[in-house]
């Protein structure tokens, strides 16, 4: 059928040529350049142009067809390669998650050789090295990935986290700074860099970063948490300023007062404000600050500060006056009674101390601190048996004098020996507390050298 169609086209073409030649018998002269020309009939010229056009179309179509075939072959190869790489990568990740690091490394390396442009393969290989305990190799692999794609946040975060695990905080900070340069409002990078500054005690720098975190967290669920953290960092900056100025910085004192107004339940601000006032010699203001702190929050640190302040100033009269005033207001406050009893003991007011401590015991409280103070109170009253009994309770000793055990791995204590630690899960780790120190200090037994004694020789 195709042959007949071809013959029919040729016949039609010849018929058209004869008809067109009959209608246009004239010759046409074509000049190629000044001295060269050729003459042909108009019919032949037209037919030649048509033939050349047809030939050009055929060649163009052939070129397009060949190009398509080449592209198709390349695409098929790329698809096959990508499929192979993806398969090796997935299997490698499964092996990695299963803990088969050797097999995971082999599969991932194979995937990387087939396609060195995929960053996720570099990151997976780095994870293998890190789990093998060779973090340096992991960093080297991540560095190569960073060189290929310097602005890949995924690679940069992985690299920064790895540096942190190795304790290389300076290098980790540089990585987080690079991320912030790429994306200035990246909250994770800002928080990570802030936390590094906190670890190093760079409070001013951490506060500056926290302000940026807060700005980037507007409308975020973590906004209240970040606002609280900013208050804490403001406190640390003020505390550091007061420490450096030996309590003389007015700006930092004002900052502490502002913090107390903003967060009345923030104990460190009240304690540090009192410490600063004390360092300035403002004893009454310091005392009032701590007393107000205790009345507002009921934290024992304020009572400890008050006791230390007046006892070092050799002014127990004022301290007792304050305590008795508070006692009238807070007669049911057992924490206060404990500290009141302790102060009475220090001042040799044994009967009053005993009265305060017995009131706490009668309320059902049983703590080592209470037992220790009761033991001391009984000792000062000459009741040695009762004193010893209280001291034993404070130390946690029982009549059998069991010394107790501790886990060598996590230091979790236990009255009885346990085959497995409930905290860290290690077996056979419970030993007598202090055993390692005793073993370390134990001198090895000296081995006597035995030699024969010859006839006539006396032994040494």
Image (tube, rainbow, N blue to C red):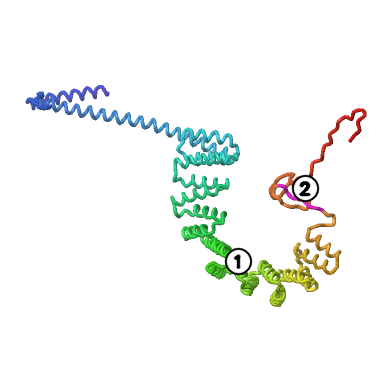
Q: Which residue is at the far right?
A: 456
Picture quadrant of residue 99 = top right
Instruction: Indicate left or right for 213 with 427 as reference.
Output: left
Residue under label 2 = 438
Work out which quarter of the rendered image holds the N terminus and state it.
top left
The region drawn magenta spans 402-408
Vertical placement of residue 229 versus 91, above or below:
below
Question: Looking at the rendered structure, which numbered label has been put on residue 40?
Answer: none
Where in the figure is residue 395, as x and y percent of width and height? 78, 59
Picture quadrant of residue 49 = top left
Work out which quarter of the rendered image holds the C terminus and state it.
top right
Camera-nearest residue between 396 and 118: 396
Q: Residues within 10 Å of mark 1 (few under 14, many from 20)?
A: many
Where in the figure is residue 68, as x and y percent of width and height? 34, 31
Point out the tag, 1 or 2, that comes first from the N-terminus. 1
Specify whether residue 172 is painted magenta. Answer: no
Between the C-alphas of marks 1 and 2, the distance is 41 Å
Residue under label 1 = 272
Exactly how many numbered labels are in the figure? 2
Q: Residues within 10 Å of mark 2 (few under 14, many from 20)?
A: few
Check contact, mark 1 vs mark 2: CB within 8 A.
no
Q: Is residue 74 visible?
A: yes
Picture quadrant of residue 336 = bottom right
Vertical placement of residue 364 versus 318, above or below:
above
């Amino acid at each position: 059928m195709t042959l007949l169609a071809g013959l029919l086209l040729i016949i039609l073409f010849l018929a058209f040529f004869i008809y067109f030649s009959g209608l246009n018998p004239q010759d046409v002269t074509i000049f190629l350049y000044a001295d060269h020309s050729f003459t042909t009939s108009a019919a032949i010229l037209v037919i030649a142009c048509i033939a050349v056009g047809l030939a050009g179309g055929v060649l163009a179509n052939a070129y397009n067809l060949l190009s398509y075939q080449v592209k198709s072959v390349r695409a098929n190869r790329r698809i096959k390669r990508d499929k192979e790489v993806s398969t090796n990568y997935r299997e490698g990740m499964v092996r990695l998650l299963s803990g088969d690091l050797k097999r995971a490394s082999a599969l991932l390396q194979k995937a990387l050789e087939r396609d060195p442009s995929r960053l996720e393969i570099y990151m997976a290989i780095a994870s293998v090295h890190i789990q093998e305990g060779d973090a340096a190799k992991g960093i080297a692999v991540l560095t190569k990935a960073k060189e290929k794609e310097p602005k890949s946040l995924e690679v940069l975060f992985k690299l920064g986290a790895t540096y942190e695990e190795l304790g290389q905080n300076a290098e980790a900070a540089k990585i987080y700074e690079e991320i912030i340069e790429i994306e200035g409002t990246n909250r994770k990078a800002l928080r990570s860099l802030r936390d590094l500054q906190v670890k190093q005690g760079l409070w001013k720098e951490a506060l500056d970063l926290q302000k940026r975190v807060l700005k980037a967290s507007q409308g975020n669920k973590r906004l209240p948490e970040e606002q609280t953290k900013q208050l804490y960092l403001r406190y640390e900056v003020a505390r550091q300023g007061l420490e450096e100025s030996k309590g003389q910085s007015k700006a930092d004192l004002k900052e502490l007062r502002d913090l107390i107004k903003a967060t009345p339940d923030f104990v460190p601000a009240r304690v540090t404000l009192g410490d600063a006032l004390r360092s300035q010699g403002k004893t009454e203001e310091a005392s009032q600050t701590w007393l107000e702190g205790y009345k507002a929050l009921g934290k024992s640190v304020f009572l400890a500060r008050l006791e230390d302040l007046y006892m070092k100033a050799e002014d127990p009269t004022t301290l007792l006056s304050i305590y008795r005033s508070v006692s009238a207001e807070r007669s049911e406050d057992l924490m206060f009674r404990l500290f009141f009893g302790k102060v009475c003991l220090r001042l040799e007011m044994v009967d009053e101390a005993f009265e305060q401590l017995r009131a706490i015991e009668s309320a059902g409280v049983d703590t080592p601190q209470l037992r220790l103070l009761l033991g001391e109170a009984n000792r000062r009253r000459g009741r040695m048996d009762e004193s010893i009994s209280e001291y034993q309770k404070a130390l946690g000793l029982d009549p059998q004098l069991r010394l107790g055990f501790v886990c060598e791995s996590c230091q979790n204590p236990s009255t009885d020996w346990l085959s497995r630690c409930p905290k860290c899960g290690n077996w056979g780790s419970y030993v007598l507390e202090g055993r390692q120190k005793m073993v370390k200090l134990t001198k090895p037994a000296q081995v006597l050298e035995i030699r024969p004694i010859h006839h006539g020789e006396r032994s040494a």
